[in-house]
């Protein structure tokens, strides 16, 4: 089906392909903005990144990235509803589930770079890189959203001591299982949708996606800025609350969750390039 879609659109007389793809991406970005899944800046960023991925990798690349976005949006909304139903108190998040430009950039920059590398090189390692970074972004999101539903207290990935729910660097068995399965699912669809890729390459995609999620947790526990609000007795990713400056509890001030997400995504992408060049 994907091959037929590629032929149907990309073999049209120029400039019809770019007009159709641009109009389609604009519609998707507008719908996401209207549904408050993306801010205006996030929608603009998603439009350009999605268009580059679609034009470079065809519908296989677009569907894989779209699968990440849709699945993560749905699991976030479901997790939020369940947690609010339980009335649980968690770490105050700097940002909600509406993705802004920085969140889109953190999860989509490396995928866009991989798509461009494929356009200029047509080497399979660029496809492995693309799959790995999409798997990492999906794995990290599922780990956080599903992990918060665990009835067991999360522990720090650094010292295995109990930490509040939602605190960066905290992990649960449920969250890690969700991370592994979601990364494996992305690797499976990557294998099914792309041409001339191998099972070994798919295993590498899934493994590096999950490994990137672990790196994200280590960075979240070690360097991400976390603040404490003495009034609410809660930890927060935001440095202010109601105009009050909060004290830095741990981490580096300029390293927020977006920076951590970007760094772990870069890790998965670079390792995918390096390992696929060495062993595949």
Image (cartoon, helix red, strand yellow):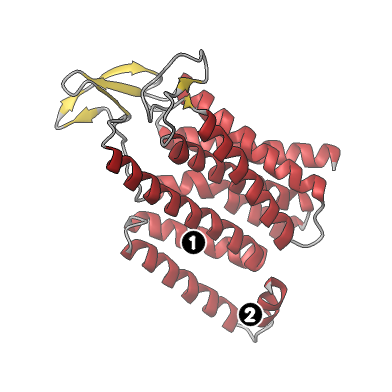
Tell which of 214 and 185 is nearer to you.
185
Q: Which is closer to the viewer, label 2 or label 1?
A: 2
The quadrant in which residue 195 appears is bottom right
Q: Which mark is on residue 99?
A: none
**Number of numbered callouts drawn:** 2
Residue 202 image point, x, y percent: 75, 48
Give SS at disc 1: helix
Residue in view at x 50 percent, y 15 percent: 160
Query: Can you identify the residue that label 2 sits on?
Result: 9
In the depicted structure, whether residue 127 falls above or below residue 252: below
Residue 280 image point, x, y percent: 85, 43
In the depicted structure, whether residue 227 falls above or below residue 93: above
Asked if one can make out residue 99 in the rendered structure from this viewpoint, the answer is no
Asked if one can make out residue 40 in the rendered structure from this viewpoint, the answer is yes
How many residues crowd mark 1 within 10 Å: few (<14), some (14–19), many (20+)?
A: some
The quadrant in which residue 30 appears is bottom left
Q: In whole angstroms, how far apart are the C-alphas of marks 2 and 1?
A: 19 Å
Residue 3 image point, x, y percent: 72, 73
The quadrant in which residue 226 appears is top left
Residue in view at x 46 percent, y 35 percent: 147
Mark 2 or mark 1: name the one nearer the start of the chain: 2
Q: Which mark is on residue 48?
A: 1
Residue 81 image point, x, y percent: 32, 47
Give SS at disc 2: helix
Residue in view at x 70 percent, y 44 percent: 205
Residue in view at x 46 percent, y 20 percent: 155
Tell which of 232 and 15 is nearer to you.
232
How many residues crowd mark 2 within 10 Å: few (<14), some (14–19), many (20+)?
A: some
Q: Is residue 150 left or right of residue 113?
A: left
The quarter of the rendered structure image containing the N terminus is bottom right
């Amino acid at each position: 089906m994907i091959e037929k879609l590629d032929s149907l659109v990309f073999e049209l007389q120029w400039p019809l392909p770019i007009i159709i793809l641009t109009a389609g991406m604009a519609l998707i970005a507008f719908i996401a903005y209207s549904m408050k899944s993306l801010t205006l800046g996030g929608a603009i960023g998603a439009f350009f990144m999605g268009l580059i991925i679609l034009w470079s990798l065809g519908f296989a690349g677009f569907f894989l990235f779209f699968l990440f976005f849709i699945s993560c949006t749905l699991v976030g909304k479901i997790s939020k509803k369940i947690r609010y139903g339980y009335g649980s108190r968690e770490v105050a998040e700097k940002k909600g589930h509406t993705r802004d430009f920085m969140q889109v950039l953190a999860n989509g920059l490396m995928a866009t770079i991989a798509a461009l590398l494929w356009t200029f090189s047509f080497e399979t390692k660029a496809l492995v890189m693309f799959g790995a970074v999409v798997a990492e972004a999906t794995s990290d999101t599922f780990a956080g959203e599903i992990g918060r539903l665990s009835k067991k207290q999360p522990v720090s990935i650094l010292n295995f001591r109990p930490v509040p729910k939602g605190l960066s660097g905290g992990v649960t068995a449920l969250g890690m299982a969700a991370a592994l399965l979601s990364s494996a699912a992305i690797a499976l669809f990557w294998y099914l949708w792309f041409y001339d890729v191998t099972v070994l390459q798919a295993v590498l995609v899934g493994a590096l996606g999950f490994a990137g999620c672990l790196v994200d947790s280590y960075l979240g526990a070690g360097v991400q800025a976390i603040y404490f609000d003495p009034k609410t007795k809660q930890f927060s990713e935001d440095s202010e609350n109601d105009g009050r400056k909060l004290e830095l509890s741990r981490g580096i001030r300029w390293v927020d969750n977006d920076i951590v997400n970007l760094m772990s995504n870069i890790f998965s992408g670079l390792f995918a390039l390096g390992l696929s060049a060495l062993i595949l």
